[in-house]
Image: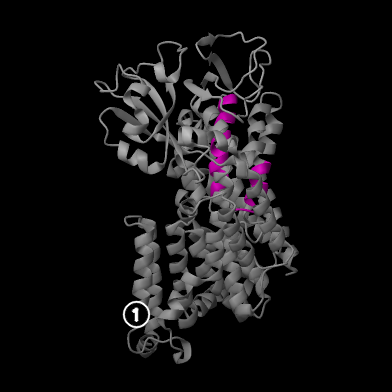
Amino acid sequence: MASELIENWPMWVSLGVIVCAIVFYVLDRWSMELVSIGVVTALLVVFALPGATGVGGTPIGSADLLAGFGNPALITIMALLVVGQGLFQTGAIDGPTKSLVRSYGKRPIYTLFVTFLAVFAISAFTNNTPVVIMFLPIMSAIAMRMNASPSRLMMPLSFVSILAGMTTLIGTSTNLLAADAYRRTEGISLGFFEQSPMGLMLAAVGLVYIAIFSRFLLPDRDTFAQEIVPSGKQFVAQIEVTHDHFLIGQAPVAGMFPDLKDMTVRLIQRGERALLPPFEDIELRAGDLVIVAATRKAISDLLASKPGLLQQIWQGDDAQKVETSVPQLSLIEAVIAPGSRMAGRTVEMLGFRRLTSAVVLGIQRRSRMIRSKLGQIRLESGDTLLLCAPQDVFQELRTSRDIILLEWSQKEIPITAHSLAARLIALGMVVLAATGLTSILIASVAAAFAMIITQCLNTRQASRALDLRIFLVIAAALAMGTALEKTGAATLIANGVVGFAAPHGPVVILSTIFICVAILTNILSNAATAVLFAPVALEAAQTTGSDPLPYILAVIYASNCSFASPIAYQTNMLIMAPGHYRFSDFLKFGGPLLVVMWVAFTIMAPWRFDL
């Protein structure tokens, strides 16, 4: 026995490294990035030692352990993150969802159903994280209309997106990683909709559970919803009507200008004349100054939909002369500090743009309504300014003693003029991959590249979408999976699972694999669990002489059961603060859902796989 342990020491050391990695991930005392780098380093050191070989003396070199960093599945995941960021940045999915909030008052149940259906449909074909981000404010707004806490809707939002990920090959990164292990081991590529039949049935079971038990098991507590829903306070803003401006020739309809949605025109300055409402028989013309009251969301939406207006504001009088593109601009709110040197002076007197490198889009004052040109308003302590500038400008203004930046309010102005291009690119990617015209790797990389060259994203935004945590955790998991496979540890674990469940038949083996993976995915992460257990499941299939397809699908479905822990999946982390959830809330609502999915899989597996 001792000689066997000594002979197989690389396998036992590899298992020890993996166990330590799981413990460190769970303890969360160090960042996942640091733990991942430590795991890769430890494995590199172990297999650099004399005698550290795989089964049958097969050498395991550094290239084998580092191959995960160039793994096609990992590259595909990174490309999909860029595509998802492009959809988010351009507001490509904002338009259809805005109507949902407006329709809630007329048909509340129908609206909720359509909203969750939209989340499900979109999440099945794109990265879940940007989808959840886009629907967070919508769910908060619907919760307010329901006079309920957002905690009733936020966890269902995350879980519906996770359930949708079970239904297609690109639904989540987990699916791609497990499919890659299947391709490497069996030489067979999973089809785009291979997992869809049973995935849809499991998702249906999960959706029924959510619909029934969310009203009983989810908390109903106060939350930070008011911070998520766009602020309703009104800013005084100014629009200069120039030549070729979209407002030229516009006339009011019932006192409102149709192209200035959700904005109230308070004053039109025409030369020396000040035209006050109600506006009758007035057509806007070049040279007019239109003073409006609007929320920051209305201002942001207008700027996003009119790139020419954004260029005019940022480049000023030279807008028509300058051909360079406008940098990515953000909006932020800033308060005039008590004792500020800016108090008592106007924006024009201060030369605010020259002084701060930021443009004042609007001024908000609680005490009274302002009807005057933006440049003529004397600032007071406590006034809130709506500023527009590149992100690096705001970083420099953080040290200012004259204005206080409200960091939570910073948001980039989306480039909605490119939303159609973003939709077409994402749709083209799905069609190419689903029809088999090209691989998902080529389709996703091409789509990511198209997002950049069509200016749906700039290179900085694309690089920001490449999540370093996901990249390192998956690469480390692939290195651990390689060590498991080549040292025979996967065979050992598979034999243990088969030995325990084999007397009861293949259904029990599949069920045992499912529950083990489902539990571990909530402790570790779904991507890492899929990579670690894919070779184990495939080895179990070989040991029993069974078709490997049900085994790899069991890993895919189970590793997507990230319901019982907030650290199990990114979307669970996203909804914690908006829903004001505690760790125990996930156990209370997500734990039973995990068990329900396990039971459903165990019941469906014999029918689906003819076992």
Secondary structure, magenta segment, majority class: helix
Count the marks: how many? 1
Q: Is residue 348 above or below residue 322?
A: above
Q: Position of residue 64 (x, y in %)?
A: 46, 79
- Farthest residue toward the front? 321
Q: What is the quadrant of residue 166 in the picture? A: bottom right
Q: Nearer the viewer, residue 196 or 536?
A: 196
| Residue 139 visible in this rendered orientation of the protein | no
Q: Which residues are magenta?
A: 117-146
- Amino acid bearing label 1: Val
Q: Quadrant of the C terminus?
A: bottom right
Q: Residue at x 38, y 59 (%)?
A: 32
Between 395 and 475, the residue placed more toward the observer is 395
Camera-side residue of 247 and 387:
247
Magenta-span inclusion, residue 384: no
Please report the residue visible at 32 percent of the width from the left and 24 percent of the height from the top.
350
**141 left or right, relative to 211:** left
110 left or right, relative to 145: right
Residue 316: percent from the left, percent from the top?
46, 33
